[in-house]
Amino acid sequence: MIKSILKDTSKDALRYVPAKVVPALVNFVGLIVFTHIFSPEDYGNYFIVLTTITVLHLIGSNWASSSVMRFYAEFNLKGKLNELFTNIIFSFLLCNVIITIIYLSGLVIFKTEIPGQLIPFLKISIFCYLFGAAYLVLLYSLRAGLQATAFSKFEIISSVGKFALVMPLAFLLKMGSISLLWGMLCMNLILVALISRRLSLWGKLKKSLFSLKVSLNFFKYGAPLALSGLSAWLLILSDRYLLQYFGTAKDVGIYSVSFSVVDGSFVLLYSILMLAAYPVIVLTWEEKGKEMTQQLIREFTRYYFILCIPIFVGISILSKDIFSLFVGKGFAESYKLVPLFAFCSLAQGLFQYISTHFELYKKTLILALILLAAGVINILLNILFIPSYGYMGAGVAKIIANVILLILGISVSHAFIPWLAPLRSIFKVAFSATMMGVILTFSKRILATSLINLMLLVVMGTCIYFIILLIIHEIKQDEVDFVKSHCHRLIKTVIH
């Protein structure tokens, strides 16, 4: 049964590949372009405002998209999807009217306290948030309905479209990094219209189906997740504000570029699996129960380690080469942060699987408190480390906080769904990645820094890693055959 579920999920995961590969490539190209035309200070202002938009998402939309993911299968099995959409959308609109009023009032009240260069960014950011939030709620409706191909298409349109809109604004009109926000706003507006049409959304929304009880049930589930999101923000992004306070916008720019490169690399891989896995985990929980779900999560975390541990090793070793070749000179020292961020991304990806234990049991308040504890520790450590060690101190604080997060998540969730760690697989993967790392380190000393040599090292490291896994029988032949047989589907998806 588990093998059958995993095969079906793997098929969905392959359909999600374009949704992550294409945006990752576009974002990487954008990073190369924009770090050469924007200064670290200008880029730092953009990232400060982007962090603010993230906070708004966590408060105003995270609960809605999470509720869609959690309850879609339940309402679909009862034939009540129209009721689901009606209550989610109406509640979402009410929530964000309130948020918009509070946000705009705050801008007026605290205008004199905000650095002048941030005001234009903050004015447009609320509209970037509103249409971006609506886009995400609708997009996750497709994901919850296992419409992987449609999900991928819209993600590709989003990334390519934003880049295409930003380029003339940045190069022809010389608008600076605020052009990134204008591109985001225009593209999100287009995407909301396109997905609404695909979902036939307006035909699903019926006033008679609105239920205060149902909406409150969504809010009861989602509100602690909003707290979880804010707590995650304290853990992942709050250091931008502290770097700005104790340092400069340049520090924020350098720090954020390094984080973007690392986070993009990890998210590209682990989110592909998680995008397909989460709806299947929820459906298995609803139909098969605890034991089957527990085994399924164990297998998913095995795949996670196989994909992400070699990325952690490889990007840490090759970081200096990557940054010297691709980012602007003003951001070159960002490479020093890469190993720290790589470890944090590895930990955060694993915690996604641990957090499903809390969500399945609807223990979202406990999850929020765990994230809050780690987030508060991160802030306290940042306050302690940043004045003396700058952005490197912020990186070390993030590592400590993420280790605490994992320890708390695993130990607390053990009370209702113990995590079955694939220890044998972890050992084999770590051994293979270490051997790969040793060979890459020696090879790097021989080869000069160039794009061709970097590509050679990446290909060589990948081959060495998977060959060792095959030799020690961590990757099974049926898994190899499965990937081979479905590669043509990926190619067809990209083409069509």
Image (cartoon, grey):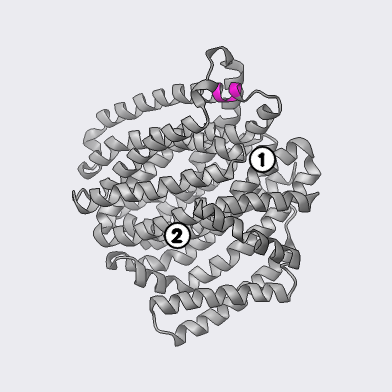
Q: Can you give x and y, in whole percent of width and height, for residue 15 in the image?
A: 58, 51
- Picture quarter containing residue 480? bottom right
Q: Which residues are magenta?
A: 82-86
- Picture quarter containing residue 486? bottom right
Looking at the image, which residue is at 66% across and 59% down?
A: 303
- Do tag 2 and tag 1 residues touch (Cβ < 8 Å)? no
User: 152 left or right of 247?
Assistant: right
Badge 2 marks a residue whose secondary structure is helix
Give, as a three-letter code, the residue at label 2. Gly
Q: Which residue is mark 2?
A: 395
- Does any portion of residue 348 appear in the rendered image? no
Q: Which residue is mark 1?
A: 358
Q: Residues within 10 Å of mark 1 (few under 14, many from 20)?
A: many
- Does any portion of residue 85 appear in the rendered image? yes
How far is the residue under mark 2 from the one under mark 1?
28 Å
- Residue 365, relative to residue 402: is it above or below? above
